[in-house]
Amino acid sequence: MNLLYATLGLIALYIYVSFASLLWEGIDRKLVARMQRRVGPPLLQPFYDFLKLMSKESIIPKHANKFYELAPVLALAVSIALLAYTPMGFAPLFATKGDVIVFIYLLTLIGFIRVLGAISSGSPYAQIGAQREMIILVSREVPMMLALFTILWRLNNIGVEKPFSLATFYQRNIWELGTPLALIGTFILLVVFLAWLASEIEVGFFDIPEAETEVAEGPMAEYSGRHLALFELSNAIKMFVSASLVVAIFFPWGISAYIGLNGTLALVVDVLFHTLKVFAVLFVSMSIFRAITGRLRITQAVQVFWLRLFPAAIIGSLILAIDLLGVIA
Amino acid sequence: MNGKIEYWVKIPIGPIHPALEEPEKFIITLDGERIINVDVKLGYNLRGLEWIAMRRNWIQVLYLAERICGICSFSHNHTYARAVEEMAGIEVPERAEYIRVIIGELERIHSHLLNLGVVAHTIGYDTVLHLSWLARERVMDILEDIGGNRVNYAGNMIGGVRRDIKDRHKKAILDMIQYYRQEVMPKVEEIFLYDPTVEARLRDSGVIPKRIAIEYSAQGPTARGSGIKKDVRYNEKLGVYPDLGVKPVTPKEFTGVIKGDVFDRMVVRVGEIWNSMEIIERALDQMPEGKIKAFPKDNLILVKLKKAEGEGIGRYEAPRGELIHYVRAEKGKDGPAKWKMREPTFPNLFAVARALVGEQLADVPVAIASIDPCLSCTDRVAVIDANTGKRKILTEVDLLKESIKKTKEINPNIKARPERIGIGRCML
């Protein structure tokens, strides 16, 4: 019975997140348009795009192999599976010990499937886009994972039920430590996470794999119709999920407890409040970031990850470690 | 050739590609992201303009020249008018020369603002694109006010200009300059001289060293960005320009170094917008009263030109570089017997293709956009024998031989013997 409720919850969550993430794309386009002194598309433009793409013929290149058609379906399936392990204002539906590993694995898998689909399409633009995506993929995960595991390790030390699981963020949060050193370290890691988020959704500096003016949308160059629509949807969900991780780590507070709700209503209120926080994080990391920056070269982006963000993550982690060990009182 | 070749990938950029505004084709051989060779293919935008011109009269060609290109529409018919005036020995009234300067510099401002936006777009910096094109609307409004059209303002006539600049226009232009000085240019400078993203992407990409720029005869901001002080308005003392303080802008005045990269070309453009505004102010100040046309009626021009015979060459510094028009007249014909133009984009394109070798694929769109290519100007020649219908492709050797012959004919004093440099050869 429990499993049945969880499955129904997952389906409801999938429908809700699809709407919320597509809605955010519309809001983002409108906000950026206003920043650029344009009128911008209607708020519901991503929905119109999605529905139109679904009704369009999907053209399959002659040199594409079977995986080309399979990749969008797999990408969407993985992003739905990812929702079961995403903190949404409450602990993930299938929360268990160490589920953070599954979360990172599934998040990376979406990018990997995109690469496979691009390579299968047989287009040289897609090949270059896939190479770039792969390079970015291996660079961006390192600082993020270091920061994430440091925070989980630190939380583990102040006592939680299930260590190294995403549910811990709703029991204790990193700001509770309260010492000046911990605050500084947490702040550095927050910056690392916001940069990681921008690269995960590929905007601003990191719009490299899908660079429109260089490789004509890169991995997506050959996709059209239904297949493209599925990829668009899975990308939107991935964007929402990535931002959810940042929100869960740094801003996990819910409002249902304060206004004295419980049961299903509390869950709904928490999800809505969580969505607002996700939009706020995405506003910083996506809208503002893409309005004030251009694209870097791939070599420069890799340098940003290994020479800027990775040392920042190490320093942030060391500060948190020093705070725990109490070397400096 | 060697074992490495099998890892090389050939990527076509064009004829249709999101980075290109007009159809052109670059076949790029890649080793990973590094460029091994660039091959340029032109001819996707041939409209047979020279052929059309042979069937029109002198004044109709003026409007045809205006439609060669949408951005430098004034430059083309200005240069054509200069060529015809030189051929027929027509004196242009001084006020007309000043009006030509003013419209020409307004056009330079709008063309450079457009290019700044396009380059920002190719590095994915769309905010700069939208804001710089918003600022450009102001100068377009002025041009519309003067000429009646945003793009083809039809300002020129053989022996003068068609429309006067009145006090109303003068006031509007001074207002516009004030607006650009105080609100637009500080922001443009902040973005193109100091912004970290722009510097990261534009510095050291698409480097055209001074030697390559000279060998490939680069023109305009492309040449000046490489440190060559080449500007027809300055070097040839064109029209009334020497009185107005025109000077070739090089990046040295702004940044202190000359590298010849995309960044430097953009700096040259920013400097030229400043320079153009100064020129316009001085021209408005010094503009004498008087007539604006050498001939009161247009049909008098046709009557005079029908009797004319000979050749004429017009030169002008278009926003993209030096523009040359050549006309030849035969007695009794009311149109040009031959009309030919040399575009700045043509030499610039090969210079930038040479510069791209050894750089990254990511630099291709921005390097191409940085020369502000105008393919509708460039694509004009297909040699077809009208009697047999055979297509003939002229090789570089043939063209060089012919051009040496022609140069000797025009100016027998020139002793230099240019060498073949072999552009566009495939390395494989």
Image: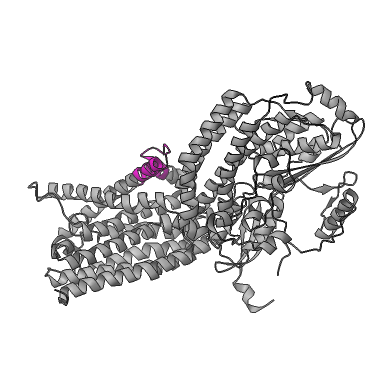
- Residue A16 coordinates in the image, percent (x, y): 27, 48
The quarter of the picture where the C terminus of chain B appears is: bottom right
Q: Main secondary structure of the magenta part?
A: helix
- Residue A62 coordinates in the image, percent (x, y): 57, 58
On screen, residue B215 above or below B117: below
Say left or right for B310 vs B396: right
Say left or right for B327 vs B19: right
Asked whether A43 falls inside the magenta stretch, the response is yes
On screen, residue B104 above or below A217: above
- Which picture quadrant has residue B288? top right
Residue nearest the viewer, comparing A16 with B150: B150
On screen, residue A197 above or below A287: below
Asked whether A101 falls inside the magenta stretch, the response is no
Say left or right for B119 vs A159: right
- Which picture quadrant has residue A161? bottom left
Say left or right for A42 vs B270: left
The quarter of the picture where the N terminus of chain B appears is: bottom right
- Residue A288 coordinates in the image, percent (x, y): 36, 50
Q: Please say whether residue B400 is visible from this viewpoint.
A: yes
- Residue A132 coordinates in the image, percent (x, y): 47, 64
Q: Residue furthest right?
A: B331
Residue numbers of the magenta segment: A25-51
